[in-house]
Image: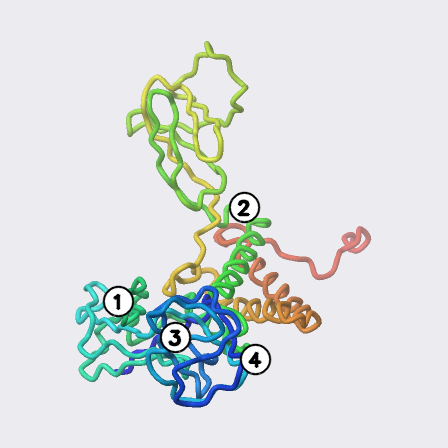
Amino acid sequence: MIIKTRNTLHENAIKTFTTHPEVAGTNVLRWANPNGFSASWAIQVGEVGEEQTEVVLLGTATVAGTAGTLTANTLYEHPTQTPIYAIKYNQVVFERSTIGTAGTATPMTSGSITYQADNIFTQFDDTSGSSTYAYRTYFRNSVLNQTTTESDWITSSGFSFYSLAKIRNRIKDKLWNPSFVDDDTIDDWINEWREELINAVINVNEDYTLGTVNVGFGTDGLGTITTADFSQMRRVWITYNGVDKYQSTKMNINDFYPDKVFSSTHPYHSFQGDSIILTKPSDTAGTAELVFYRFGNPLVNDTDELPVPMRTYTRSFTDYGVAQALYKDEKDTSADRKMAVLNNQKNDFVLNLGARDKTGPTNIDLVEPISGEDALY
């Protein structure tokens, strides 16, 4: 079973360039600026996916001056202005869990592979692998013995069609140069479009994206909303005994005097700041059951998936990413045309999701208006 991980270390790495043509078999690279490079770090010479791109290690001496000394000779020649990336790590470590994603991944025998920068992926052949196994990877510097955190799980089925990783890869496949933008930038574009769709639907259906949470409050009446995607309140019910629940009425913090008397069967609430709710009466602890507008959590991990209602609109996410890349490349006319198409896709999304409950009466549009005279015959 072939396990692959995308080579992305260069995307956030400091970069310089060769100042002279370098022949194959040299252990010295003449560069423009060594700032940000450190001793014993791995460096990538060339762009990811190019045939003569290679990864080498800097020596233990402090990095400075117009040239860097390597621990081994280069394999290929490199012309002037070849990019040099301070990627730090020279290995990919492949881990395996034989009981799927429920297990713990451990490094495999011979699973520490040299970072294959001459390809888009670094891959490992797990000859004893099974479709029921799950895998993780991390990067490692073999000299410093320093590592990154583990990746998300990799399974035989790969990332789902609706996952962040899959949408990101689809955007890269449509770009003329996948290294033109890094993964973090593409992820930001994907989340921008997710917010755009959510806000468009909320404008026509304010109940589109609601969440619920219970917030406990003490005898001071104060409770803290800790839900990460809380936006604003839709409805509040309050219970003081866990059984009887009463709908709370919104009030402003200046709408009552200190000696005002409140009834537990007709409670009130107000806000102090963004996440502190004040309930009245406040002589007894209780629970506020909130229904709130939520803006949703952004897609962060490779395995994170789009909300279910958006899954038939994945094309709009890839198109938005390509449009933003066009803007970044100052091809505004092409980007504007793609955004016009995207706006039509957004309108379709709003039309289909503006009214999510179709169990009630349906409005019928009149194709031809009827005049008063026509109604007499």
Q: Which residue is mark 3?
A: 6
Q: Earlier in the sequence, mark 4 or mark 1?
A: 1
Give whichever of discs 4 and 2 has the lower sequence position.
Answer: 4
The label on residue 206 is 2
Q: Are marks 1 and 2 in contact (CB under 8 Å)?
A: no
The circle drawn on residue 176 is 4
Q: Nearer the viewer, mark 4 or mark 2?
A: 4
Give neighbour class at mark 1: few <14, some 14-19, many 20+ (Cα, 10 Å).
few
The first of marks 2 and 3 along the sequence is 3
Q: Which residue is mark 1?
A: 145
Single out the mark in the foreground, 2 or 3.
3
Looking at the image, tell me whether mark 1 or mark 2 is earlier in sequence order.
1
Compared with 269, 337 (above or below) is below
Residue 30: x %, y % from top left: 48, 78
Q: What color scheme is it?
A: rainbow
Could you tell me the amino acid type at mark 3? Arg
